[in-house]
Image: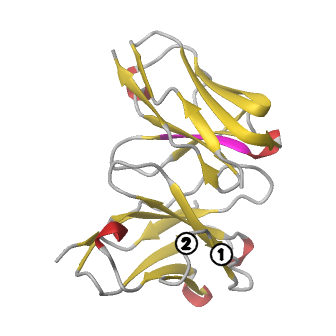
């Protein structure tokens, strides 16, 4: 069965970096793009962008350029989100979600990774 | 960029009642790309409806989606206690701000 398993919670100081992983299993990793979604405490879902798992080409949504980097390691079917120069407002749960090929909606989501930025 | 506006922000109902949640798009949306999710505290969103009106695998038939163009609706025919949660609509990669369905 398809699974997306994310890395565990992180506590970081302002200015540090964090790398969140999303390990996929149960399907051919390079056949579906991967999305990243942010959810700040008590807030809604915000699409951060996506990465083409076949080419490695990332696309970033407005507001997620510069400090945010999507990457892949296809040898271990894993997508990564790296955030640099962390700020308090980066505190959020970050989700990966597998894109759909032929329909709307994303059926498969990771369980989420809480990143807390605090001094 | 299409903006999705959900209403109401909060809906207070009792178990057994019917819930109607709305999602309006700032411009006409292909109905093939409108989805609805349910999210409970501490959990990832769960896909309920895709392509505006198709139920995802395992979703009870009390959940239904309808609409086209700029106006879409999620209906829960008879609320069960486990249905109280936050609901989001999504078009392509934009999300609405959510409707919180709470117990009255």
* Residue A52 in the image, given as x and y percentages of width and height: 70, 77
Q: Which residue is labeled 2 in the image?
A: A24
Q: Earlier in the sequence, mark 1 or mark 2?
A: 2
Q: Which residue is labeled 1 in the image?
A: A29
Q: What residue do we see at 50% from left, 39% from top?
A: B98
* Residue A49 in the image, given as x and y percentages of width and height: 61, 69
Report in which chain the residue with disc 2 lies.
A
Q: Is residue A96 visible?
A: yes
Q: Is residue B93 left or right of residue B78?
A: right
Quadrant of the drawing holding the N terminus of chain A: bottom right
- Secondary structure category for the residue under label 1: helix
* Residue B42 in the image, given as x and y percentages of width and height: 33, 49
Give the total of numbered labels. Answer: 2
Which secondary structure class fits the magenta region best?
strand
Magenta region includes residue B36? yes
**Disc 1 to disc 2, C-alpha distance:** 7 Å
Quadrant of the drawing holding the C terminus of chain A: bottom left
Magenta region includes residue B50? no
Q: Which mark is residue A81?
A: none
Relative to A5, say whether A42 is above or below: above
Q: Quadrant of residue A47?
A: bottom right
- Secondary structure category for the residue under label 2: strand
The magenta span reads: B34-38
Relative to A4, say whether B74 is above or below: above
Nearer-the-camera pick, A73 or A58: A58
Q: Do tag 1 and tag 2 residues touch (Cβ < 8 Å)?
A: yes
* Residue B23 in the image, given as x and y percentages of width and height: 63, 33
Q: Is residue B75 left or right of residue B50?
A: left
Nearer-the-camera pick, B48 or A62: A62
Badge 1: residue crowd in 10 Å (few <14, some 14–19, many ≥20)? many
């Amino acid at each position: 069965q398809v699974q997306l398993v994310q890395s565990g919670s992180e506590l970081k100081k302002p200015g540090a970096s964090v790398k969140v992983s999303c390990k996929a299993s149960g399907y051919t990793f390079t056949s579906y793009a991967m999305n990243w979604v942010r959810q700040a405490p008590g807030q809604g879902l915000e699409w951060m962008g996506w990465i083409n798992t076949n080419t490695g080409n990332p696309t970033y949504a407005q507001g997620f350029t510069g400090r945010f980097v999507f990457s892949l390691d296809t040898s271990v079917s894993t997508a990564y989100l790296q955030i640099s120069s962390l700020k308090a407002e980066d505190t959020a749960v970050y989700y990966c979600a597998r894109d759909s090929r032929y329909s709307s909606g994303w059926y498969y989501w990771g369980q989420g990774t809480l990143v807390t930025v605090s001094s | 960029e299409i903006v999705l506006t959900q209403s109401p922000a909060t809906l207070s109902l009792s178990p057994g009642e019917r819930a109607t949640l709305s999602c309006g798009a700032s411009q006409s949306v292909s109905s093939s790309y409108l989805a609805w999710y349910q999210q409970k505290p501490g959990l990832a969103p769960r896909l309920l409806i895709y392509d505006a009106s198709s139920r995802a695998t395992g979703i009870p038939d009390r959940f239904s989606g309808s609409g086209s163009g700029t106006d879409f609706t999620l209906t829960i025919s008879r609320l069960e206690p486990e249905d109280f949660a936050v609901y989001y609509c999504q078009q392509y990669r934009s999300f609405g701000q959510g409707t919180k369905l709470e117990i009255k």
